[in-house]
Image: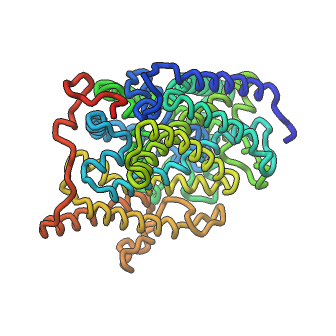
Amino acid sequence: MSGIHTVELVVFVLLFVGVAAMGFWASRWKAGSTMDHLDEWGLGGRKFGGWITWFLVGGDLYTAYTFVAVPALVFGSGALGFYALPYTVVLYPIVFLPVLRLWSVSRANGYVTPADFVRGRYSSPTLALIVAITGIVATMPYIALQLVGLESVLRTMGINGHGFVGHLPLFVAFLVLALYTFQSGLRAPALIAFVKDGLIYLVIIVAVIYLPSKLGGWSHIIDTAQAKFDASPSPADGITLTRNNQLQYATLALGSALALFLYPHSATGILASKSRDTIKKNMIALPAYSFLLGLLALLGYVAIAAGVKPVVNNATGAPDTNTIVPALFDSQFGSVFAGIAYAAIGIGALVPAAIMSIAAANMWTRNIFKEYIKRDATPKQEARQAKWASLVVKFGAVAFILFINPQFSIDLQLIGGVIILQTLPAVAIALYTRWLHSKALIAGWVVGMAWGLYLLYTIGNPATGKQHFGGSALALGNLSIFGWHPFSGSAIQIYVGIVALVANLLVAVVVSAILRAAHVRDGRDVTSGADYHADEGDPGLRGVAEH
C-alpha cells in the first residue's frame, strides 16, 4: 500500500473519528424512556421533526454509491447516467399519498416494518414473510455497495492492497459503525446525516463552480465529452440518448422511483417521522437533493475534460471506475479540501448503511424471529434481537466485499431493484384496496420474481465478459412469452424490473378475479379505515414504545 496520501488521510480520519463520536453520543439525543423497544431503537422514538427527517431520508436515499456511481456512469456512457435525475423528480409526487397512509396505519397499530402492515392487512404470515425476506435480500447488496463507495475513497488515498490486509481499514470503519449503531439505533445516522449532507453540499457546490472555471468552462467540457463518446465503439454512448436506449432510460427511471420507497430503509425513515405534516413538508423539500444530484452527475463530464483515469484496483489489476470522482478531486483540489471531499463520500456511506442494517434487522426481528421462532418475545427481547441482527447484516455486507468481486455486487444492486419491485402489489396497492387476494399476491410475486430473475440471467455484458446477470437492460427482441417473441428483431431496450412487475400484477389480478368469483375467503383485515388517516395527537392513538 505504497503512495499513501498522508494529508488527505489525516483529514479523512479526523472527520471520521468526529462522526463516530457523534454516533456514540446519539443514544442520549432526544432519548426516550428506554432503548429496549423497536419504537425507540429502530425508529428513533417516532418523533423526528421536519429538519431531522429531511436530512435522515435524504441521507438514506442519496448514498455513497450514488455519489461515486452516477458520475462514473456519466463518465463512461454519457446521457444514460442522468436517469437518476428524472427518477428522483417523479419519485416524490408518486409516493406522496402512499407514504402518508403507510405512516398513519403504522402509527395507529404500532407497525415497525412494511411487512408488519401486510401481516395486519391480510392476516397472512406467509405473505408477510415473503415481503420481509424480499426486503432483506434486496437490502444486503445495497449495504455492500456503500462499502464499494467507501473503498473507492480509500483506494484513491493509496490504501489499495491485496487480500484481507487491503480491506482492513474498511473492516475497522464498519466495526465502528456497527458498534455505535448497536448502541444508538436510528438516532446515530439521523444525527450524523446533518454532517454528511453539509459536507456533500459544500464539496459539490465548490466543485461545480471552481472546476469548470479551471478547465475552460462548461462549453469546452461538454465538447470534450462529446469527442470522447464519438470515438467510443459503443453506439449507445453519447451526451444524448439513442433510439434504442430511450425506453430503457424511461422505464429505468420509473422502475427506480417505484422501487426506492419499497426498500425497508426508505420506509424506516418515513415511519420515524412524528406526524403526517412532517412527511408532507419533506415530500416538498426533498427534490432539492435532485438539484444536488444533477450537479454531481455533471462531474462525470468534468472528469473527462480533466483527463482523469480510474485508479487501478491492485487486488484485481483492473481499473476501478468508481474512483473517477475521488480521482478528480485528488487531481484538481489541494490536499486539505480533497480530504474533506473524501470524508464527505466516506461518511455518506455510513449513514445509509446504518439505516439499511437497522431496517433489515427490524424485519428479521418482527416478521421472522417473533412470527416463527419466539412468538411471546417481549419488546426488550425484540430490541436485543434487532441489535444483534444489525451486526450480522453489516458483516454480511463486508463478506460481499471480501469474497465477491465488487463489480458483481454492483450487478446485484440492479437485481435488487427488480426484486424489491415485486412487493409493490402487496405493500403499495394494499394501502388503498384489499381486492387483490392474499393468495393471488403470493402467486403474482412468484411469477414476477421467477420471470425477472430468468430475464436477468439471460442478459450478458460483453465489456466484462459476463454471460449472465450482466445488467438490467433487456432488448425487446429477446423478450419471450412461452416461446412467442412479440418484438422479434427489435434492439430497443427496456428495464427488466418493469417487465417482471407487469407480469406480477397481471397474475395477481387474474387469480384474484378467479378466487373472488369462487368465493374463496381471504384473511381478516385488522386495520380500520380511520387508521389510514391517523395523525399525531389524535385521541386514543397508540403510545410510542407501548406493548
Query: Residue 123 at what x, y percent from top left?
Result: 26, 53
User: Where's the C terminus, which quadrant?
Assistant: top left
Count the marks: how many? 0
**Residue 185 point in image, percent of width and height:** 51, 32
- Give the colour scheme of this rendering: rainbow
**Which residue sits furthest bottom?**
483
Q: Nearer the viewer, residue 30 or 505?
A: 30
Out of 340 and 26, give the one closest to the viewer: 26
Q: Between residues 162 and 132, which one lies in front from this camera angle?
A: 132
Report the side of 250 relative to 523 (left or right): right
Q: Which residue is drawn at 41% across and 58% down?
A: 497
Res 297 seen here: no
In the rendered structure, the answer to whether residue 379 lies left or right of residue 314 reads left
Q: Quadrant of the N terminus?
A: top right
Q: Residue 240 at what x, y percent from top left?
A: 50, 47
> Which residue is located at x 21 percent, y 37 percent?
531
Q: Is residue 38 visible?
A: yes
**The furthest residue to the right:** 2
Residue 92 placement (x, y as % from top left): 35, 36
In the picture, measured across the screen, residue 536 lies left or right of residue 492, that is left
Image height of 483 relative to 335, above or below: below
Q: Which residue is drawn at 39% across and 37% down?
A: 89
Q: Which of 35 and 338 is in front in this view?
A: 35
Vertical relation: 141 (above or below) 223: below
Examine the image and state in which quarter residue 545 appears: top left
Q: Does residue 467 sit above or below 401 in this rendering?
A: below
Eyeballing the image, is 469 above or below 76?
below
